[in-house]
Amino acid sequence: MPRGVWFSVGVVLLFVVLPFVYGNHDLLFSMMMYLVLAQGINVLFGFTGYLPFGYVGFFGAGAYGMSLAILLLHFPPFAALIAGAAAAVLVALVLAPLLRLSGAYFAIASLAASEVLYYVISNPHLTSITQGPYGINLAAVYDSSASYAVMVAVLALALGMVVYLRNSRTGLALQAIREEPVSAGFAGVNVVRERTRAWLMSAALAGLAGGAYAWHVSVFYPKPVFDLNISVFAIVFTLFGGVATLSGPVVGTLLLYGLYNWIGISQPQYFQLVFGVVIVALVLFLPNGLVSLLRRVGANVP
Amino acid sequence: MSFSATETASPLLRATGLAAGYGLLQVLWDVDIEIGQGECVILLGANGAGKTTLLKALLGLVALWHGSIEFKGRSLAGQRTDQRVRQGIAYMSEIGIFPNLSIDENLSLGGYHLPKRDVRTRASQLYAMFPDLEQRRGALAASLSGGQRKMLSLAKAFMGGPQLLIMDEPSAGLSPRYVKEVIATLRQLREGGLSMLIAEQNLGFLDLAGRVCVLDSGRMSFSGGRDALEHDDILRRSYFGLDGEDDGRTD
């Protein structure tokens, strides 16, 4: 059995069982959404080293792809969800040349690209197609338990993707690209193809999460699905837990998003303070994330 | 002016009329080089003579301005580095290893294009050759000493079962003891039929050479046997920096 399978099964089962004992299903849904986004960041940043600050662009593309497939093409929700993922992948294909940039240049360019997407979609002149700034209303297909179940499936897919990368030569090749792209070429790795593949996989995850989110909330404005904070949260959760691991992003999301919901909404000023201190401490003392602590004492973490 | 090797039936690698450079700076001028099956060619040249550029051009890391490269009789034009590697050219250089991956992972990346089964067999063969590495196979490559890294880099380059091993200064930064070890390992590989092209400054490597090529300011100024080299003024001037008499050499 590949490493991490049981861990993934445990996480998925947790979200299958929790709704029966815990009433705040919206919180559970958002938690899963961030778990998926954090693993999506992990696939790209953890394995290939590209940090996409504009990651939310794929999420928004997924939300709008899903919604417009329902509103304009009258797709049933499940097919529309695939259309949402396809929209995110399409955006990623168009943006694939950004992968020629590296480091901060890539991060900023991807951020700019997600802003461009936001302004296109929220443009009042496109109201007849995208509903422009007036937002989307999917009340006709609203189904909170089906959309919850879909997010559980997307979570399972995200975890499965990382389990695969952690145990396969493809994942190793991606890490080689992260370490040293030129040397990866000497190892016979087709650098451009592999990193593009990771980029598309990562985008597909965000697109699926965005689609499931759109279905779950069913009424939303363009701003919240293109909110930079979504990128920042997913990135911080991933880094906090530890990149290029399976458990790191999970642990990071559960702890920090838990903290956010505990004090972030009632006492945002304290949350900002704690959040800031956590990030500084992380960068200074645990650059490889929380799970690297366990590794340091010799534990075999997935 | 360029020299070519004595004609063999069909050289493993044949590069003709190579010109390459960076931006406006031309580094290689009409360079020819051939490497026969099982032959070991040592490439000498002063710093800045274009050795690394030539090796990179052979691997497709530097774009050619002119000229052509054939490997096993087929043109390499338009092929990416990873495609050349898959055909049997391996490259070993300073940056060849991944410090944040384990020794095991480094080795299996070396055999990335091989079937999984072969990776395991080859890895165990190579561990037998490099017992130092086997002891620490789970450790990160960053924890290895300079000499061990060089060995890992060599093992990794050899992992994919190349027919031609191209090396850029395998002795750089190594103590004399390790240099001897590297040379001994290379001799072993050469006896196994591996062809090699080694850019070096360390003359100890000349013992391995079937043939020596000398690059001088981006031009191939000598190609021939070791014995001929020892009597050649061009080498003394270009490599050892000794000023010879003017013999009408043009730049």
Image (cartoon, helix red, strand yellow):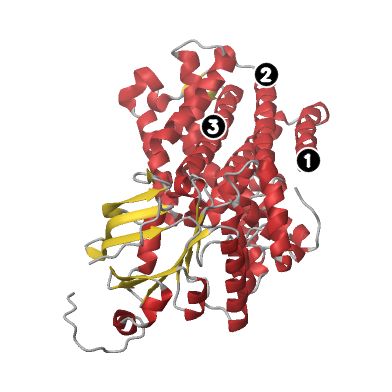
Q: Secondary structure at mark 3?
A: helix
The residue where tag 3 is placed is A204
- Rendering coords of residue A129 (x, y %): 37, 19
Residue A225 visible, this orientation: no
Q: Is residue A201 left or right of residue B127?
A: left
The residue where tag 2 is placed is A146
- Rendering coords of residue A232 (x, y %): 54, 48
Q: Secondary structure at mark 1?
A: helix
Residue A194 visible, this orientation: yes
User: Badge 2 local density, few (<14 within 10 Å), some, or many (20+)?
Assistant: some
Among the 4 quarters of the image, the one containing residue B213: bottom left
Q: Secondary structure at mark 2?
A: helix
Q: Measure the alpha-carbon separation of dots 3 and 1.
A: 22 Å
The residue where tag 1 is placed is A7
Kind of residue indicated by mark 1: Phe
In front of the other: A130 or B82: B82
